[in-house]
Image (cartoon, helix red, strand yellow):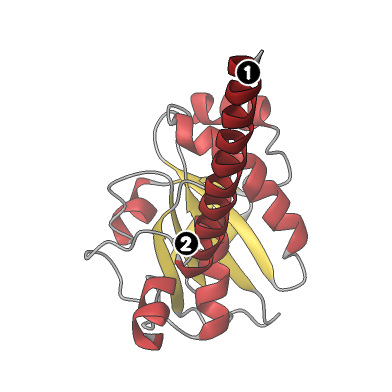
Amino acid sequence: MTALAVSNVVLWILVLVLSAVVLALVRQLGVLHERIAPAGALMLNRGPAVGEPAPLLEVADLEGHAHQVGAARADGRSTLLLFVSPTCPVCKSLLPAVKSSRKDERAWMDVILASDGDTLEQRQFVRTQGLDGIPYVVSAALGLAYQVGRLPFAALLDEHGILRARGLINSREHLESLFEAKRLGVASLQEYFSGAL
């Protein structure tokens, strides 16, 4: 009976010690989470520079509507240019966030999706992904002008046709980092946080 009581006491002490260790680890995770800066869109060293006028191109979407990408806009709205592909799984997983952001940011921004390749394949992609109503441009020249090498790639142009933010994006956080970079007046969130440190 004494051995049973001693082992029970030892087990309870062990449970209390482990509980204290778990609480300490949870606290440390919270501290680390506060210290980690949000990840922004990955900036590439090639292509148009942030803060300079965007390449000006006139393109037509799949519905035949003309768009002057990079031109100053009289309506004072910004443009998010997102390069995607029907064969890109990351692009497909990002589209719900793009649709949501388009709705949430509709007061100041329009979205144009861009790709290149077979037009029939692009039309099918638009249908299967529920992208009706979002201008979808098929233009190799647009991708070349922005030096798009990997997808999904986004460029945020302000109402004056100035490139405000750009980069590879693969999550909603990366997409929203472009909006935040424009709001803060920096090329990227990484630039902002490196200056703040």
Residue at (60%, 35%) from the top-left corner? 15
**Labelled disc at residue 2:** 1
Element type at mark 1? helix
- Looking at this view, name the residue that lies furthest to the top: 1
- Nearer to me, 147 or 90: 90
Residue at mark 2 = 32
Of the 4 image quadrants, the one containing the N terminus is: top right
Residue at (53%, 67%) from the top-left corner? 34
Find residue 118 and report its horizontal and vertical position in percent: 43, 28
Find residue 117 and report its horizontal and vertical position in percent: 39, 33
**Labelled disc at residue 21:** none
Q: Amino acid at mark 2?
A: Leu
Find residue 192 and report its horizontal and vertical position in percent: 42, 81
Q: Quadrant of residue 101?
A: bottom right
For the residues labelled 2 and 1, the Cα–Cα distance comes to: 45 Å
Find residue 7 and report its horizontal and vertical position in percent: 58, 22
Element type at mark 2? helix
Of the 4 image quadrants, the one containing the C terminus is: bottom left
Q: Nearer the viewer, mark 2 or mark 1?
A: 1
